[in-house]
Image (cartoon, helix red, strand yellow):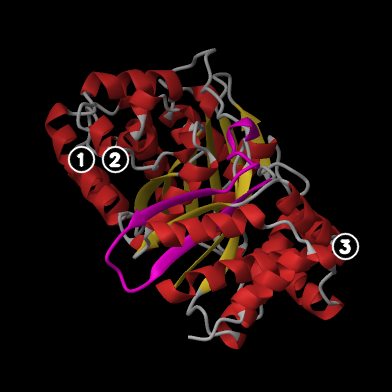
């Protein structure tokens, strides 16, 4: 891997891969919902859409056609901490791909005639997030970070976007789309010296600025640990979709390895505690899982699933019991070993993809300011012991009560019962017996 910082502050990274003819190139911009004021909710995502609508020298159609010639594709996505523009092409066409990306990011016109069309596209995208699975995930983050821009939907809110103007987006871009906030990364059939020269040409008129993006609020805005936080969206559905969330370490924390192992053991697949107990033994759910979401300013452990209204409380009680059980005793060595090796294997296998390599380099530059070799990541995972996982589970519960979101046929008595169960949760023998009795519910 090689890294160069250009005079403008733009960083260029490359990772050559032997035996391939393709190259994946990406431009990571350090801007996302974390940087948006209340009146700018959704701007990062809308700008991402608008940059594909043409430049002074290329129309939207020509941008797409140029990528087709290279046998690849161009795309983009917005995450909570950043925005990425990327392309995968035959190595012969890397200069063309970089020229297109540079043109888009430095010279897009944000045409007024395309703005309303893209606003409609985004509003349709927002409607698509109204699916129960997406909705419950959005809601639990609103409960977890009530006063932070991190709680807002990435695609934005209709009430904010409906009044957005071209001038608003241009001001937002002028503040955040600057050289200091960008990194260009390529992986695959690439030579660093050529890449550096090509990036220098393609981004020659990129703005620079001393001003950087505002940082997201940190854990001070997490939900109040003294009382249960339950947020619901009642809907006429057959099942109740649920999500429980606890605060967790940020992306750059050394503890992240432990939390990846914890979530794998808790809800990482068919051999996990939640799947085996709540689905295979109790029959309370069809699908359930746990995941660790990490960002620059904080993270969260989320347990998500769906169940029938009659089994909601037993299911939530079961989640609490399984997590509590992990605080009381370490997982058996065999299960722990399998979880760690699964994570290591997934990391190494996915690294065969040029796109994955490119993405990793970009994120590591954003969060750590350096490249983390695969050997370092594997070693970090393999250093996790059952005792460390037990301590992470204890840390999770000590942080406070979970925030919880529900979407489906819920009513006030059900919410009261859920809130009462969470408020009482503390791990006393009497309460554990009560929860175990609740989970033993038979439909």
Q: Are marks 2 and 1 in contact (CB under 8 Å)?
A: yes
**Residue at x-position 85% and y-position 58%:** 388
Measuring from the top left, give residue 161's x and y in whole percent. 25, 33
Query: Considering depth in this image, is 342 or 309 the residue closer to the camera?
Result: 309
Q: Is residue 437 visible?
A: yes
Q: Work out how far the residue at label 3 is from the one at label 1, CA to CA, in angstroms.
A: 51 Å
**Residue at x-position 80% and y-position 61%:** 389
Measuring from the top left, give residue 134's x and y in whole percent. 39, 57
**Residue at x-position 39% and y-position 43%:** 153
**The quadrant where residue 176 appears:** top left
Q: Which mark is residue 387?
A: 3
The crowding category of the residue bearing disc 3, from other C-alpha atoms within 10 Å (few below 14, some 14 to 19, many at least 20), is: some
Q: Work out how far the residue at label 2 is from the one at label 1, CA to CA, in angstroms.
A: 7 Å
Query: Considering depth in this image, is 133 or 401 the residue closer to the camera?
Result: 401
Q: Which mark is residue 118?
A: 1
Vertical order, 15 against 328 (above or below): above
Badge 2 element: helix
Report the span colored magenta. 219-248
Q: Which mark is residue 212?
A: none
Q: Is residue 165 left or right of residue 240?
A: left
Badge 3 element: helix
**The quadrant where residue 413 appears:** bottom left
Q: Work out how far the residue at label 3 is from the one at label 2, CA to CA, in angstroms.
A: 46 Å
The crowding category of the residue bearing disc 1, from other C-alpha atoms within 10 Å (few below 14, some 14 to 19, many at least 20), is: some
Quick check: is 247 in the magenta stretch? yes
Q: Nearer the viewer, mark 3 or mark 2?
A: 3
Badge 1 element: helix
The residue wearing badge 2 is 49
**The quadrant where residue 276 appears:** bottom right
**Residue at x-position 42% and y-position 18%:** 175
């Amino acid at each position: 891997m090689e890294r160069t910082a250009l005079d403008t502050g733009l960083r260029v990274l490359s990772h050559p891969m032997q035996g391939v003819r393709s190259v994946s190139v990406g431009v990571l911009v350090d801007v996302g919902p974390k940087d948006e004021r209340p009146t700018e909710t959704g701007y990062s995502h809308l700008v991402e859409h608008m940059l594909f609508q043409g430049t002074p020298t290329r129309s939207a159609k020509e941008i797409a056609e140029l990528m087709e010639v290279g046998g690849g594709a161009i795309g983009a996505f917005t995450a909570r901490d950043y925005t990425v523009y990327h392309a995968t092409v035959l190595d012969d066409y890397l200069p063309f791909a970089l020229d297109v990306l540079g043109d888009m990011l430095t010279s897009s016109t944000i045409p007024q005639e395309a703005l309303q069309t893209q606003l409609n596209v985004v509003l349709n995208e927002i409607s698509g997030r109204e699916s129960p699975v997406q909705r419950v995930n959005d809601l639990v983050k609103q409960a977890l970070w009530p006063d932070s821009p991190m709680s807002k939907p990435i695609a934005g809110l209709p009430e904010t976007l409906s009044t957005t103007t071209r001038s608003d987006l241009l001001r937002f871009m002028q503040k955040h789309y600057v050289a200091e906030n960008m990194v260009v990364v390529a992986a695959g059939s690439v030579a660093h010296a050529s890449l550096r020269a090509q990036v220098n040409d393609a981004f020659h008129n990129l703005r620079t600025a001393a001003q950087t993006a505002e940082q997201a609020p940190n854990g001070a805005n997490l939900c109040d640990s003294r009382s249960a936080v339950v947020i619901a969206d009642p809907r006429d559905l057959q099942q109740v979709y649920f999500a429980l969330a606890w605060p967790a370490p940020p992306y750059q924390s050394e503890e992240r390895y432990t939390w990846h192992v914890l979530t794998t053991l808790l809800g990482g697949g068919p051999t996990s505690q939640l799947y085996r107990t709540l689905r295979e033994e109790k029959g309370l759910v069809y699908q359930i899982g746990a995941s660790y979401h990490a960002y620059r300013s904080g993270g969260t452990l989320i347990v998500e699933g769906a169940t029938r209204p009659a089994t909601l409380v037993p299911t939530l009680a079961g989640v609490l019991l399984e997590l509590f059980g992990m605080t009381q005793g370490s997982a058996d060595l065999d299960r722990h070993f399998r979880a760690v090796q699964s994570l290591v294997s997934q990391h190494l296998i996915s690294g065969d993809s040029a796109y994955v390599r490119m993405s990793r380099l970009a994120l590591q530059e954003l969060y750590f300011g350096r490249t983390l070799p695969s050997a370092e990541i594997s070693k970090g995972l393999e250093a996790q012991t059952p005792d460390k996982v037990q301590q992470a589970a204890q840390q999770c519960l000590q942080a406070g009560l979970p925030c919880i979101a529900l979407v489906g046929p819920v009513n006030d008595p059900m919410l009261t019962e859920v809130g009462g169960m969470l408020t009482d949760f503390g791990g006393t023998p009497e309460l554990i017996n009560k929860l175990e009795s609740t989970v033993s519910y038979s439909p």
